[in-house]
Image (spheres, helix red, strand yellow):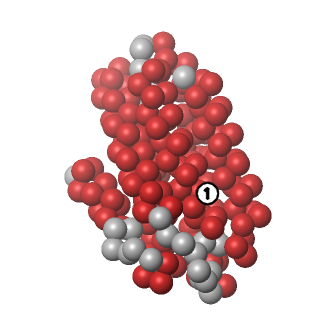
Amino acid sequence: MQFKIFALAFTALAGFVHAQQLSAETLAGAINFIADTSQETSDLVRQITPFNPVTFVTAVPRVVNNFKALANTVASNALKLKGIEVEEPFSADGQAQIFDAFVNLVRVYKNLFDILFPRSRIISSVGFGPSIAGALRFLEAGIDTFALNIIRFIPNHSEVATKGQMGLRQLFGAALDRF
């Protein structure tokens, strides 16, 4: 089921070539999809507990795989957005829709790391730290590029969105320091 979900995300932005073909709804939908899938990863991270070794051993590899799949999806969408020239910004309502989706994405990642950070010591102590760090490094690069590309489409909200993007950088930096 995970692969079908990520295949859908991969194609979420595949249908456009120029900014005129990209709608605010499509971009907001792609951002929301990544946020929703990241939330599912948060739910997996919650299962990582030393009190249930069986769940622990199965949950951590699934988290690593989710991070890797998310990284591929985000990187693909970031590359698609990078190739689009913004000739005219979206309407104020369209920009607000994209901005709201972006703010939600930042919130989801803050929550994800709030759940992951307290588990970093136990994850690292059993040898999964390097796997998590590698997946996070790849995801960080994609999220950063994706965020920068999103900001180009929302000039009315670029100042606040840039702060959100910087917050994401700090979160990923703190996560990588822990693993």
Quadrant of the rendered structure where residue 50 is? Answer: top left
Q: Secondary structure at mark 1?
A: helix
Q: Quadrant of residue 106?
A: bottom right
Locate the C terminus and report the quarter of the image it occupies: top right
Q: Residue at x 45, y 21 (%)?
A: 130
- From this view, report whether residue 155 is shown above or below residue 36: below
161 horizontally vs 34: left or right: right
49 displayed left or right of 144: left
Q: Is residue 55 visible?
A: no
Pinpoint residue 97: horizontal percent, then vertical percent: 58, 77
Residue indicated by mark 1: 148
Residue 119: x, y in percent?
A: 53, 26
Q: Residue at x 47, y 84 (%)?
A: 20
Vertical order, 147 against 140 (above or below): below
| Picture coordinates of residue 111, whole percent (x, y) | 59, 46
Residue 65 shows in the view: yes
Q: How many numbered marks are there?
A: 1
Judge by depth and name the residue closer to the eye, 112 or 21. Answer: 21
The structure residue drawn at horizontal position 74% and vertical position 55%, both measured from the top left corner, is 163
- Give the residue type that dot 1 points to: Leu
| 76 vs 27: above or below | above
Q: Position of residue 52 (x, y in %)?
A: 37, 24
Given residues 90 and 168, the one toward you in this image is 90
Badge 1: few (under 14), some or many (20 or more) residues near its Cα, within 10 Å?
Answer: some
Q: Is residue 15 left or right of residue 138?
A: left
Q: Name the residue at 54% across, 72% down.
A: 85
